C-alpha cells in the first residue's frame, strides 16, 4: 500500500514546529518529511544525494514549499521540479511570509499550484493549514507518480 | 584758312554747355552774371530769377541745418580766388538748395564738388569768376548708405553673443589639413574660447593638443564647401562647443566662417543629470530590496511569537492562572498589532515608490467591491452603503483602490458601534472643483484635532476604542498627493465624519 506523505520544505525551526503542530492539531496523520534547505529538498524529491535510495513507494500528496531557503532558493527548487519529467506534476503549494507581488507572479510563472501567505496570527495560520489539509490531502486528486 | 571765332554764338554755346557753370562778378557780393542751362536745372532755378542778384542772396544756407557750412566755405574759396588770382578747388561740400514753392518749398539736400576759377583780363585783373560744380549728391548719399550699412553690420557682428570667426585652413603638400589661422574674430570670440589676440595666430600654436577632428572638419568644409553643424569637445580649452561652419569666399581661398557657442555648462548639467538619474535608480533599487526583506524577515519572528504564545495558551492552560492567560493574550495582540503596522508601512512605502499609471478608473465599481468585501468580514452587522454610480476618473487603479480601501475601512471601523451604520460615497463640488467624499455616521472626531488626522502614527482614538495603526490616512494623503489632488476632512464628535478628496 502506498503511503501518502507531505513534504515540508522549511528552513526555520520555529516555523517548522508551528506548521507541524498545526498539521497535527488538524488531525492530519500523514507522515511529514521535513527538508531544511533547497538542496536537501531536491535531493529528497529526486531520490538522490543525501536521500538516495529513499522509499519510492511513497506518494507525495503535496509539497509545502517555503521561498526563502539557504543553499538553493525556493523558486529554484520549483523550477527544477517542473523541469524534470518525474516531478513535473507534483502538487506544490508555496507557503511564505512574503507579500511581494513579484514572488507571487514568479511562483505561479514557474508552475506552483498554489500560493499561501503565512499569516502572523497563529489562529489564522491554523485555519489556513486546516483548509490546506482538507483540500490537498482529501479533495484533490493526486497525479500519477513514478515509483 | 583760320576759323572765324567771331561767328560762334558763344552765349548759346555757354548756356548749352554740358556742365554746371555760374559766372560771378568779382566783388564782395559776387553778383551772378550768367549761368548754364544745366546749372539752372541742377539748382532748380530760372535765369531771370538769379541773374543780377548776389550769389548768397540767391543761394542761402538751409536754415534748418545748424551745421551748414556752404555759404562760409564758398565765400572763403571765392575770396581766395580774388586774393590769389588762381583757381581754388573745394572739397565735397554739402550745400542744400531751395525747392520752388510750386513744388512744395523747403530745402533739398545736395552735395557738390566745386572749382572756382578767375578769368583774367588783358591787364591781369579779374574780370569774372567762373564757379563750376559737379552734383555729387547721389554719390554722396550712396556712400552714406554704405557707411551706415557697414556700421550696422559691424555692430551686429560685434554684439552677437555667439562666437564668430573666420579662419584660413592650412594644408600640407598632400592637401591634408594641418592647421588653421584666425583671420577675423568678433568680441564674443574671446569670451567663448578664452583665447586672446587670436587674429593672425595659428591654432596649433595656441593649443598644441587641440583634437585632430577640428582640423579634419574644417579642412573638409574648406575643400568641399559643405557646411557642417556639430557638437564637440575642445579638451585643452576645457570646453564643449556647438559649432556651425561653412566655407567663405572663393574655394581657393580656403577660408571658413565659424559660428560657435560654448555649451560646456549645458554639457555639464546633462552629465550631472545622468549621474543623478543613475544614483536615483540605484537608491530606488536599494529601497526595493530593503522593503522586500522587511516584508519577509520581520514577519517571521512575529509569527513565531504569536504561534508559541497560542501553543502555551492551548497546552498549558491548566497550569496558568487568569492573569497569566491574559498576559499571553496581550503578547498575541501586540504581535498582531505589529504585523499590521508592518503591512501598513510597507503599503505606504510602496505608494511612494511605484510608478503612477494614468488610466480611466471606475471609482463607483471599486467602492461597490470594497463594500461587498467589508460586509463579508462581519456578516452580522447592518450597514447601509450609498454609493453614487458612474463616478469615473483618471488615475492609478491600484493606488486608488488602496485609497478607497482605507477610507471605507475607516468608515466601517468607526461606525462599528452604531446599530444602523450608514456609509456614503459620492461626488460634489467644492471651490469650483469636483471633490469625492466618503461620509459615515460613526464616532466622528473633534475638529480641533483635524490637523493631526494625516500625521504618521497619529490617532484620535485609543486602541481600546477602535483598532488601528495611524498610518491609513497618511497612505490616503500620499496617494491623493501623487494624483496632484487635495484631501481634507470634516467631522464632529459622535456625529460622523466626511473625508473629501480631489484628484
Image (cartoon, rainbow, N blue to C red):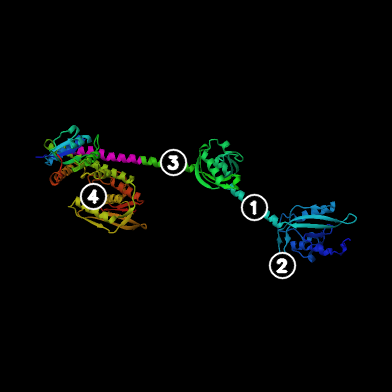
First in sequence: mark 1 vs mark 2: 2
Please say if A54 is above or below B37: above
Q: Say the numbered circle drawn on residue B413.
A: 4
Q: Marks 1 and 3: same chain?
A: yes
Q: Say the numbered circle drawn on residue B148.
A: 1
First in sequence: mark 1 vs mark 3: 1
Please say if B242 is above or below B360: above
- The chain identifier of the residue carrying mark 3 reads B
Q: What range is drawn magenta here?
A: B283-310
Badge 3 density bin: few <14, some 14–19, many ≥20, Cα 10 Å: few
Q: Marks 4 and 2: same chain?
A: yes
Separation of marks 4 and 1 at Cα, in angstroms: 85 Å
Query: Relative to residue A26, is residue A109 drawn left or right?
Result: right
Q: Is residue B130 visible?
A: yes
Taking the view exactly as shown, the residue that stands out farthest to the bottom is B102
Badge 1 density bin: few <14, some 14–19, many ≥20, Cα 10 Å: few
Where residue B82 appears, as percent x and y from the top left, is 84, 54
First in sequence: mark 4 vs mark 1: 1
* Image marks 2 and 3: residues in contact by CB distance under 8 Å: no
Q: Nearer the viewer, mark 4 or mark 3?
A: 3
Residue B291 magenta-drawn? yes
First in sequence: mark 4 vs mark 2: 2
Q: Nearer the viewer, mark 4 or mark 1?
A: 1
Judging by the rendered image, the residue that carries numbered circle 2 is B102
Amino acid at each position: 500500500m502506498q503511503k501518502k506523505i507531505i513534504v515540508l520544505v522549511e528552513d526555520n525551526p520555529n516555523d517548522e514546529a508551528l506548521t507541524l503542530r498545526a498539521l497535527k492539531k488538524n488531525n492530519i496523520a500523514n507522515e511529514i518529511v521535513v527538508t531544511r534547505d533547497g538542496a536537501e529538498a531536491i535531493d529528497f524529491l529526486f531520490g538522490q544525494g543525501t536521500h538516495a535510495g529513499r522509499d519510492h513507494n511513497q506518494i507525495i500528496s503535496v509539497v509545502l514549499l517555503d521561498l526563502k531557503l539557504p543553499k538553493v532558493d525556493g523558486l529554484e527548487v520549483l523550477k527544477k521540479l517542473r523541469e524534470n519529467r518525474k516531478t513535473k506534476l507534483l502538487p506544490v503549494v508555496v507557503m511564505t511570509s512574503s507579500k511581494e507581488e513579484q514572488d507571487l507572479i514568479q511562483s505561479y510563472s514557474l508552475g506552483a499550484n498554489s500560493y499561501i501567505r503565512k499569516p502572523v496570527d497563529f489562529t489564522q495560520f491554523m485555519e489556513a493549514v486546516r483548509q490546506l489539509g482538507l483540500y490537498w490531502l482529501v479533495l484533490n486528486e493526486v497525479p500519477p507518480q513514478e515509483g | 584758312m583760320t576759323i572765324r571765332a567771331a561767328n560762334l554764338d558763344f552765349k548759346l554755346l555757354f548756356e548749352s554747355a554740358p556742365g554746371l557753370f555760374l559766372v560771378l562778378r568779382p566783388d564782395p557780393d559776387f553778383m551772378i552774371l550768367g549761368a548754364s542751362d544745366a546749372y539752372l536745372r541742377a539748382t532748380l532755378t530760372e535765369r531771370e530769377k538769379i541773374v543780377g542778384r548776389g550769389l548768397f542772396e540767391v543761394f542761402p544756407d538751409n536754415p534748418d541745418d545748424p551745421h551748414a557750412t556752404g555759404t562760409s566755405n564758398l565765400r572763403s574759396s571765392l575770396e581766395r580766388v580774388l586774393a590769389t588770382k588762381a583757381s581754388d578747388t573745394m572739397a565735397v561740400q554739402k550745400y542744400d538748395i531751395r525747392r520752388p514753392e510750386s513744388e512744395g518749398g523747403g530745402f533739398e539736400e545736395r552735395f557738390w564738388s566745386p572749382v572756382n576759377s578767375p578769368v583774367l583780363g588783358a591787364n591781369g585783373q579779374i574780370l569774372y569768376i567762373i564757379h563750376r560744380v559737379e552734383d555729387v549728391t547721389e554719390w554722396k548719399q550712396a556712400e552714406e548708405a554704405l557707411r551706415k550699412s557697414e556700421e550696422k553690420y559691424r555692430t551686429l557682428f560685434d554684439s552677437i553673443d555667439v562666437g564668430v570667426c573666420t579662419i584660413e585652413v592650412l594644408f600640407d603638400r598632400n592637401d591634408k589639413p594641418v592647421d588653421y589661422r584666425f583671420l577675423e574674430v568678433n568680441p564674443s570670440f574671446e569670451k567663448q574660447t578664452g583665447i586672446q589676440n587670436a587674429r593672425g595666430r595659428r591654432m596649433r600654436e595656441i593649443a598644441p593638443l587641440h583634437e585632430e577632428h577640428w582640423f579634419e572638419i574644417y579642412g573638409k568644409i574648406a575643400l568641399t564647401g559643405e557646411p557642417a553643424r556639430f557638437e564637440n569637445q575642445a579638451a585643452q580649452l576645457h570646453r564643449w562647443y556647438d559649432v556651425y561652419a561653412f566655407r567663405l569666399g572663393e574655394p581657393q581661398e580656403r577660408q571658413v566662417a565659424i559660428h560657435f557657442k560654448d555649451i560646456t555648462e549645458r554639457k555639464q548639467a546633462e552629465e550631472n543629470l545622468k549621474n543623478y538619474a543613475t544614483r536615483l535608480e540605484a537608491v530606488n533599487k536599494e529601497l526595493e530590496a530593503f522593503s522586500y526583506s522587511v516584508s519577509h524577515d520581520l514577519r517571521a519572528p512575529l509569527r513565531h511569537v504569536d504561534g508559541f504564545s497560542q501553543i502555551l495558551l492551548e497546552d498549558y492552560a491548566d497550569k496558568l492562572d487568569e492573569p497569566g492567560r491574559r498576559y499571553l493574550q496581550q503578547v498575541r495582540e501586540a504581535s498582531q498589532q505589529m504585523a499590521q503596522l508592518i503591512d501598513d508601512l510597507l503599503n505606504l512605502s510602496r505608494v511612494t515608490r511605484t510608478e503612477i499609471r494614468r488610466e480611466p478608473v471606475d471609482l463607483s465599481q471599486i467602492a461597490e467591491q470594497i463594500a461587498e468585501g467589508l460586509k463579508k468580514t462581519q456578516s452580522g452587522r447592518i450597514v447601509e452603503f450609498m454609493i453614487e454610480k458612474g463616478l469615473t476618473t483618471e488615475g492609478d487603479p491600484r493606488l486608488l483602490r488602496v485609497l478607497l480601501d482605507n477610507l471605507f475601512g475607516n468608515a466601517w471601523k468607526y461606525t462599528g458601534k452604531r446599530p444602523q451604520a450608514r456609509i456614503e460615497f459620492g461626488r460634489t463640488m467644492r471651490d469650483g472643483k469636483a471633490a469625492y467624499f466618503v461620509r459615515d455616521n460613526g464616532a466622528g472626531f473633534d475638529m480641533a484635532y483635524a490637523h493631526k488626522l494625516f500625521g504618521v502614527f497619529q490617532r484620535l482614538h485609543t486602541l481600546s476604542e477602535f483598532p488601528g495603526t495611524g498610518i491609513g490616512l497618511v497612505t490616503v494623503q500620499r496617494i491623493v498627493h501623487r494624483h496632484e489632488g487635495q484631501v481634507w476632512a470634516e467631522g464632529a464628535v459622535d456625529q460622523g465624519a466626511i473625508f473629501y478628496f480631489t484628484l
